[in-house]
Amino acid sequence: MEPIHTIAVLITVAALFAYVNYRYIRIHSSIGLMLMSLLMSILLIALDRFGIPIRLYADIFVGSINFSKVLLEGMLGFLLFAGALHVNLNDLTKYKIEIAVFATLGVLSSTFIVGYFVYGISLVMNLELRVIDCLLFGALISPTDPIAVLSIMKKAGAPKSLEVKIAGESLFNDGIGVVVFLVILDTAVSGKGVCVEHIMLLFAKEVIGGAVLGFAAGYIAYRMLKSVNDYQVEVLITLALVMGGYALASACHMSGPIAIVVAGLLIGNHGRQMAMSDTTREHLDMFWELIDEILNALLFVLIGLEVLVLTLQGKYLIAGVIAVPVALVARMISLGIPVLIIKRWLDFIPGAVRIMTWGGLRGGISVALALSLPDSFNRDLILTMTYAVVVFSILVQGMTIKRMIVKYGKDNA
């Protein structure tokens, strides 16, 4: 199918589901779109079991979409920039230590906790997963997805201090998670074994290089915005910043997500205050909010449709169900220990760990990374486990996080 036809079908389906959700279901748009897309996929599978071969055409359609490439090389930069554009840099700076700890040590510790938990489960269930396969699963499932988190937490009513910590963590830890995933995959594929010096250099290049590149690109864009007063030109500059900055970071083997987050924070704060007129700010906000809503709608529809590419074996599904509490326990441990240590100097509300654990939603980035794995890394099993965690995360955690906040989230920070 031609790309334009694929896009037309996805936008039509997303618009139809958004309409149905708004008129009849009335739950959060991202959750509603994914739920309907998932139910449609399950219906197609059921119809196929009854001898109606409509699933064949759906499989061909979904199989023609390279989800990993579409998200990681297409949508992600736009969604991260749109999210970072509205994050207050002063708030992030206030909680910089907590965010830095959660986005780095939290992701790294969770990667190994999940990895070795899953390896133990693999031995018990004879899943034939190697340690490296389990660590790759740990790396792709540990970071929270900023797209899912920012989309759902906006309306959850979290205390301001906690909302900033969760949003800040999610903006940076997906970039860290992608880097950790790539480092582990590169180590496994190269067959050179673990070289600490090589890993540190690669990590520094991706993370620090990405941040420096993002700051430089954002500053150039800021200076350009400051020298003109035409909202059409200024919106175009931000569009070029996202597309050009992400492409340049990828070409230089630096972290595109981190580069775009840094650039987005710079433009959303200094750029918004010192380089834009009220008219430009209004049009810029409307443009990026529209981009955010459209791409979110497409992304969550795609996540629901991806169930059609899963290998639905009984043992794989059981492993997926077990992976859900494993991911939650690992997140609680990876957050709980740092909070226990740093709360002597920094303030946390009483239910912070519980809310951050339940509010740490996984989404499209985890699915995209799982789909990018070569078959030799038990891709089908890892994809099934990843999908189970993501579906539970968005549907169950996403729909109940508000209750968790009401129960535990008294803001005294």
Image (cartoon, grey):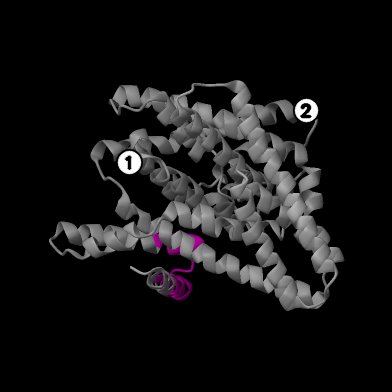
Local packing at callout 2 (Cα closer than 10 Å; few below 14, some 14-19, many 20+) is: few
Question: Does 32 lie within the magenta span?
Answer: yes
Q: Residue furthest front?
A: 251
Q: Which residues are magenta?
A: 13-35
Residue 344's tag is 2
Residue 170 at x, y = what percent? 62, 46
Going by the image, does 380 lie left or right of 327? left
Q: Of discs 2 and 1, which sits in the foreground?
A: 1
Secondary element under disc 2, as helix, strand or loop, is loop
* Quadrant (top left, top right, bottom left, bottom right) of the C terminus: top right
| Up/down of 185 relative to 387, above or below | above
Residue at coordinates 72% horizontally, 55% vertically from top-left? 263
Q: Pointer 1: what residue?
A: 380
Q: Amino acid at mark 1?
A: Asp
Q: Residue furthest left?
A: 51
Q: Main secondary structure of the magenta part?
A: helix
Going by the image, does 347 lie left or right of 372? right
Going by the image, does 51 lie left or right of 92? left
